[in-house]
Amino acid sequence: MNLKKSLKSIRKNIVYKHSIFTTIKHVYTHLDDLSNREILNYYGIESVHELESHVEKIKDILLKHEINRSDIELVDSCFCMDSSNEFKYLYSSKKDAQRQILYSHKQKGIKLKLYSCPYHCGWHLSKV
């Protein structure tokens, strides 16, 4: 076995995995401050391979249906409702949502928890 070829293959694999996370953070700016593990958790998956499959599925959908920019923005929308059938507030960054948690607890005594939007558009809060 050629050690140089083996190391080159491992390096190429690491660079490729890193580029997937970089791309995700660039396209979905609300995920920019997350670690790679947090991104996997956000999508409810366990591995980079599953993330790669997710990205490929999105690419296929966009290519097959020739979706234009305005349609893409509609797809990346949140339709989450609260218990009163009102649209939930969407935080585009995890940091903003965490700031709101601290503010609500300090100023109003309300305990909130953070969770990712099921449509992968950002973050929501719910009462504990």
Image: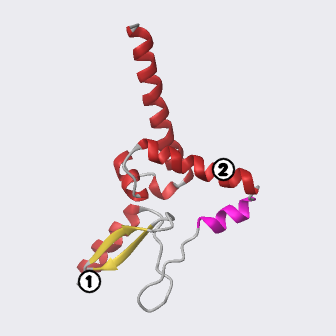
Residue depicted at x 41% and y 15%? 6
Left-right relation of 11 to 28: left
**Front one among 5 and 121:** 5
Mark 2 or mark 1, whichever is nearer to me: 2
**Front one among 53 and 24:** 53
Left-right relation of 65 to 5: right
Lower sequence index among marks 2 and 1: 2
Q: Is residue 37 magenta?
A: no
Q: Position of residue 9 (x, y in %)?
A: 45, 20
Q: Mark 1: which amino acid? A: Ile
Q: Residues within 10 Å of mark 1 (few under 14, many from 20)?
A: few
Q: Main secondary structure of the magenta part?
A: helix
In contact (CB < 8 Å): disc 2 and disc 1: no
Residue at the spot of label 2: 60
User: Could you say which quadrant of the image residue 65 lies in?
Assistant: bottom right
Q: Residue furthest front?
A: 1
The local secondary structure at tag 2 comes to: helix
The local secondary structure at tag 1 comes to: loop
Q: Position of residue 55 (x, y in %)?
A: 55, 48
Q: Mark 2: which amino acid? A: Asp
Residue at the spot of label 1: 110
Relative to 76, does residue 33 appear above or below in the rendering? Answer: above
Q: Position of residue 77 (x, y in %)?
A: 58, 69
Disc 2 to disc 1, C-alpha distance: 43 Å
* Image quarter hosting the C terminus: bottom left
Magenta-tinted stretch? 68-76
- Describe the colour scheme in one phrase: secondary structure
Left-right relation of 35 to 29: left
User: Could you say which quadrant of the image residue 1 lies in?
Assistant: top left
